[in-house]
Image (tube, rainbow, N blue to C red):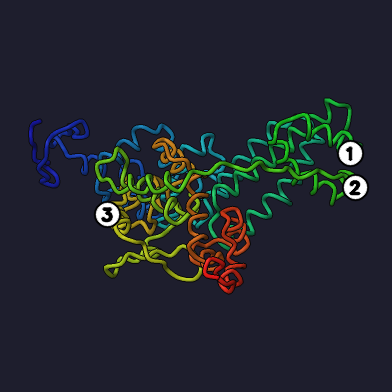
Amino acid sequence: MTERICPRCRHLGEQHCWWAHRPDGVICPGCHLTERITELLDDGTGQVAPSLLPLHRAVCTQPNPGTGLVWLAGNRHIAPLLAGLATGRLPLKHETFDDHPSPQSVMHLRDLLVQHPILEHRDRYLVLFENWLRRTLDTIQLDEDLQLVRRFATWHSLRQLRQRAAREPLAPGLTARHRREINSACIFLAWLREHGATPPTCTQAQLDAWITTGNSSRQDSRAFIVWAGKNGSMARHLRLPYHQRTPRDTITQEQRLQLLRGLLDPHANTFLRDRAAALLLALFAQPLTRIAALTMDDLDLSSDEVRITLGPHGPVPVPEPFGQVLRDHAENRGPRNITANRVSPWLFPGNRPGQHIHSTYLMNQLAKNGIHLLGTRLAAIRALVQEMPPAVAAQALGYTAECAEDHAIQAGARWATYASHRRQPDRQTK
């Protein structure tokens, strides 16, 4: 490629598609991005709208201007939305994004405005759930069902999610569960209509037929049925039996050790990020939702020994050579597009500004690498509770004592009886 000097900033670089022809010469991607974002954020006076100056600075100073130009040119919703916000035609409020015909397409811009901060902070997953709920309610045609589902969603789902979001960031799995419960409530109500019944007239026999003639997803209707019974929309005496989960297969200890050995191979066809995440899964039995939400403050690299905080009782050592994998990942976390992760606090940054990687995306990436996710975690925790008392493992790994004890029983190493076994005389020495 031909090297050029930008006439505006004197940047010297190879000319590529994001260099732009202007009357004063061919300008570099950085000047091209500054020119474009300045045009979009013009408040009508020839100046950038004062309220959007932090966004203007962030976009102009990002390290990869080509990525910013792709974002502006590749998303047809962004340019008109920025122009509307700058001129005041669109209010600079969350409601503007809530009411947008494609809220997912403009979520990245909303995240940037929250990060810088131009919009007040709102939990991202709560916003996504509220937008999803509005679309879902719009699809319910029968008014009686609509009113019932709206009440359930408002006083059960939204109430719980808003209370949790006030204490801590929501996990995507939690909002997904409430989505399933609402969807199942809609399907259940439609099923009742098809069978000549309504919620007030539903009998135990009909409820039994509902749960036994479908797949296990019908268990998601439990929350709605319990709620409807408490508020008088359904009979209180109705009972929905709990689903008995079948035991799940785990991998063997040898398979787990083989996986750990493979994660040390720097030449493996696996991203360093995925190797680091898989290591925390296979070594410390951490669920992906917790791995995705780890921060840099949870990783202590201040000494020769790498330590990581997984539970409320302080950091635990990461044995070598596994600690080096975490060191290498911490030095090269990426991605860095649109200023999202230049100073990210997350150990596993996501593509959206200020957000960590989505656990579902991480799950898909590890699954592509052939990792049996649940089997690996079960094998790891059962190995750990055989090496230490369950209560100690629970404190170190962030599990409840009851959960660790259950896994110890499954692994055949119930530490509650350890002391009495130690006191028994060795029969072979008699």
Residue 328's tag is: 3
Q: Earlier in the sequence, mark 3 or mark 1?
A: 1
Q: Is residue 240 above or below residue 321?
A: above
From the viewer's perspective, tell me whether residue 2 is left or right of residue 185. left
Viewer-closest of 307 and 44: 307
Residue 167 image offset from top left, x and y in percent: 58, 63
Q: Which residue is mark 2?
A: 237
Viewer-closest of 107 and 342: 342
Residue 303 image offset from top left, x and y in percent: 28, 70
| Mark 1 touches mark 2? (CB < 8 Å) | yes
**Residue at image location 59% in from the left, 71% down from the top:** 424
The answer to which image quadrant residue 30 occupies is top left
The answer to which image quadrant residue 337 occupies is top left
Residue 204's tag is: 1
Secondary structure type for disc 2 = loop
Secondary structure type for disc 1 = helix
* Crowd around label 2: few <14 · some 14–19 · many ≥20 (10 Å): few
Residue 12 image offset from top left, x and y in percent: 9, 43
**Residue at image location 27% in from the left, 49% down from the top:** 62
Q: Is residue 310 above or below residue 13?
A: below
Residue 268 image offset from top left, x and y in percent: 28, 40
